[in-house]
Amino acid sequence: MVVSVSRWPHVPAAVPVLEPDLAYLPSPVGGPMETGATTPALPAPETGPEPKELARRTLESARMTLVRRKIDAEYVAEVGTPAERLLEIAAARDADLIVVGSREHGLLERLLHRPVEQTVAKRAGCDVLLVH
C-alpha cells in the first residue's frame, strides 16, 4: 500500500490588533499632509491545487515508478496531519512495516515541529524503515 498525505492548507488565524491610542502619538512633523490618497490593493493570494489533488499527483508519480518495476500496490490519497494519518492507516490495516521517507530538515522546521518520520518512528506499533 502506498499512502500520500497532504496537509490541510494553512489558514492563518485572526489575530487581534490593538488600535493605537492617538493621544500618545506624536503630531506629524510640519509639512502638508496628503489627502485623498488610496491604499494600494494587495494581490490576491495564489490558489494552488487542493490538498487531495496534491496527494493524488504524488501517488501517480509513485505508481508510474512501481508499474515499471512490475510491483502491484494499492494507492491511498489522504488529507490531514501526515504522521497521524499514516499511523491511523497502519493501525487500521494491521501493518507489519511502515516505510517512510526522510529528508534533511532546516533549523526553523526542526524548532517549530517534529518531522513526520520522527513522529511515526516514535509512535508506530510496528517496525519503521526510514528511507533517505
Image (spheres, rainbow, N blue to C red):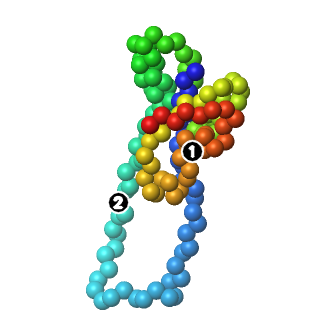
- Residue 41 is left or right of residue 14, and the answer is left
Dot 1 corresponds to which residue?
118
At 37% from the left edge and 63% from the top edge, which residue is drawn?
39
Where residue 76 appears, x then y in whole percent? 57, 23
Q: Secondary structure at mark 1?
A: helix
Q: Secondary structure at mark 2?
A: loop
Q: Is residue 24 above or below residue 5?
A: below
Depth order, front residue of 105/60: 105
- Choose top left, top right, bottom left or bottom right for residue 116: top right
Depth order, front residue of 67/6: 67
Dot 2 corresponds to which residue?
40
Q: Amino acid at mark 1?
A: Gln
Name the quarter where the C terminus is drawn. Answer: top left
**Circle 2 or circle 1, nearest the eye:** 1
Q: Earlier in the sequence, mark 2 or mark 1?
A: 2
Q: Please give the count of numbered marks on the rendered protein.
A: 2
- Residue 55 is left or right of residue 98, and the answer is left
Residue at far top of view: 70
Where residue 22 appears, x then y in whole percent? 50, 83
Depth order, front residue of 42/81: 81
The residue carrying pointer 1 sits among few (fewer than 14), some (14 to 19) or many (20 or more) residues within 10 Å by Cα, namely: some
Where residue 119 appears, x then y in whole percent? 60, 44
Where residue 60 appears, x then y in whole percent? 45, 21
Q: Amino acid at mark 2?
A: Pro
